[in-house]
Structure formats: structure tokens, C-alpha cells
Image (spheres, rainbow, N blue to C red):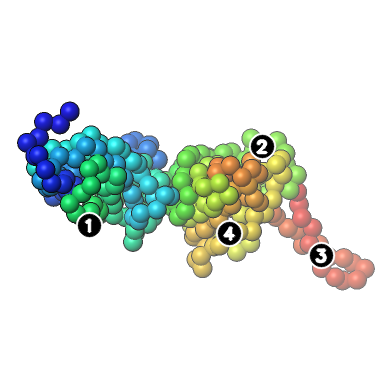
Amino acid sequence: MLQGSATGGSPDLTVNLTNSSLVLIDNQDILYEKLSISTQIDNIGDNDSYSADIYCYFGSMSQENLIGKKMIAGIEAGKSTQVSFEIETAKFANRPDDRNIIIRIDNVILSELNSDNNIGIINNELAFQIDKGISLSTIDGKSIKIFLLQGQLKSFNAIDPTSITNTQNRPDNLPYGLLDTRFETSVGGTAEVRVQFPEPLSSNVKWYKYMNDQWIAYSDVVFNEQRTEATITLHDGEEGDDDGIRNGIIVDPAGPGTLNTEEVKDDDDDHMCFISIL
């Protein structure tokens, strides 16, 4: 029970940005680096408050950007309380123009003297590890980098394609093996990732996936002009999602590859044809 000396008037809660802070909690696994958020809520009114809800957002005030909500107990007039939140930085990668932390105060009991000061914006200039790209060593020791553009990357692994016994339509050359990536999105949502290679890919390289026990060439891929990067877009439950279910999880075993072709001359009509060597 509050023991404040205020006997009349109204509370007035506000976000004290001077005493609010952001700290990165490093983790050896880049996907689990965390952003720790501490904010101070002051009652600058002339009466005690009894409770309030504190919302924390990344970038903008929308449900998809909500980091968390906490209910706080009453704050005596002239006093303050600290509220903390924590979020994995991988959930908010590569958003250079939309990175600040927004704190919103709502549902204050009693009615406030002034509700226009219930939002505070904590400036965020921290560099997340995942924004710098995730390094992955392929099965033969080559190093590639993965940049998350959309969705949340949950895991990534290198796969030896020779471990897959089905060789029908398997590319003859998969210079970086297969990358097994898994994403979380909204149900029916989209994930997008950019993969950076140490050397240019040849002009005939396509993006191959192994899904539903088949090797297929996946089309929703854009290579840059130098062919050192591939941007892949994946849709939950659609082509490109290995589990084929609209469940907010995208499974994507894939990689760049080529099918060798052999030039054959037909002696009868002197025409040229190409035979795919499987």
C-alpha cells in the first residue's frame, strides 16, 4: 500500500530519458545476442499513482514491433521506478532507419494530470552483431556471409550435399554445399536473406533447393551484377518453404549450383544439342 504524503490532485507519470539506457549483452552465438533496456518512470504529479502499464517497442508503435508489456505498481508522488525489458537483436536486424526504442505509459490509475508526456523515445545507436553479417564455414572450409533482411533467423548450418542419397537432378557442382537456414515470420509471412560469397559465381549458376525429396531450381533469387551476392526471398507455406505449411516457420536447405552440359554433334543433320549429365 502506498505511503505517500499526497492527499489530493492527480499523478503524472513520465519517461525519464536521462536515466534510461540500452546495453548489448554479448553471446557467443550471434543469434542470441540480446538488447537490455532499462527505463525510469517518474511520477511528477501531486498524488500517488496506483498502477500503470508500460509498453516497449522497437522502431515504431505497432503490435509486430512490441518487445513487451509490464504492469507496474503504484508510484508515490515525487518518486520513480525502474522497468526493464530484454530482446534478442536477431529479431530486429538490418533496420537502419527504424531502430529507436519507444516507451509508452498507459492505463494509469488514477487519472493523470497530463497524459501528453506518456511516450519517451530512447535513441539507439548500438551496432547489432547480426547487422554485420553472420559468417558460416561451408563443408569444405570456405567462408560465406549471411545478412538477414526480413524475418527472424533461428538457425543456420552447412550441409554436405553428398549426404543426400537422392541424386536425381542433383546439381553436379555445388561449390558451397547446401545452407540449411530456418526462419520465423508471421503466419504466411516472408523471409529474405542475402548471401555473400568470397568469389564471383559463374553466369550459369542457379539457386538449388532440396525439398520434398526433390532437387529443384528456385526462382525467387536475385544475383548482383558481380555475382558475388544472392538475395533469396522465401514465403511461409509456399514454394521454397520445405515444410510446406503456413505456420510461421520457413525451412530452407539450398545453395548455388550448376548442372553440367555436354555438347553433342548430330552427324545426320549437323545440328547441335545439349545433353544434361545427371
**Image spot of residue 112 (x, y percent):** 20, 49
Displayed quadrant of residue 73: top left
**Image spot of residue 109 (x, y percent):** 24, 41
Q: Which mark is residue 273?
A: 3
Q: Amino acid at mark 3?
A: Cys
For marks 3 and 1, give the one nearer the viewer.
Answer: 1
Residue at 79% in and 58% down? 275
For marks 1 and 4, give the one nearer the viewer.
Answer: 1
Residue on which the image places disc 1: 116
Q: Amino acid at mark 1?
A: Asp
Along the line of sight, which residue is nearer the eye, 239 or 13? 13
Residue at 13% in and 46% down? 9
For marks 2 and 1, give the one nearer the viewer.
Answer: 1
Residue positioned most to the right = 268
Residue on which the image places disc 2: 164
Residue at 63% in and 47% down? 237
Instruction: Give yes or no for contact between labels 4 and 2 (Cβ–Cβ under 8 Å).
Output: no
Residue on which the image places disc 4: 221
Q: Amino acid at mark 4?
A: Val
Label 4, residues with CA under 10 Å away: few <14, some 14-19, many ≥20: some
For marks 4 and 2, give the one nearer the viewer.
Answer: 4
**Label 2 element class:** loop
Height in image: 41 above or below 116?
Answer: above
Residue 29 appears anywhere in the view: yes
Lower sequence index among marks 3 and 1: 1
Residue positioned most to the bottom = 270
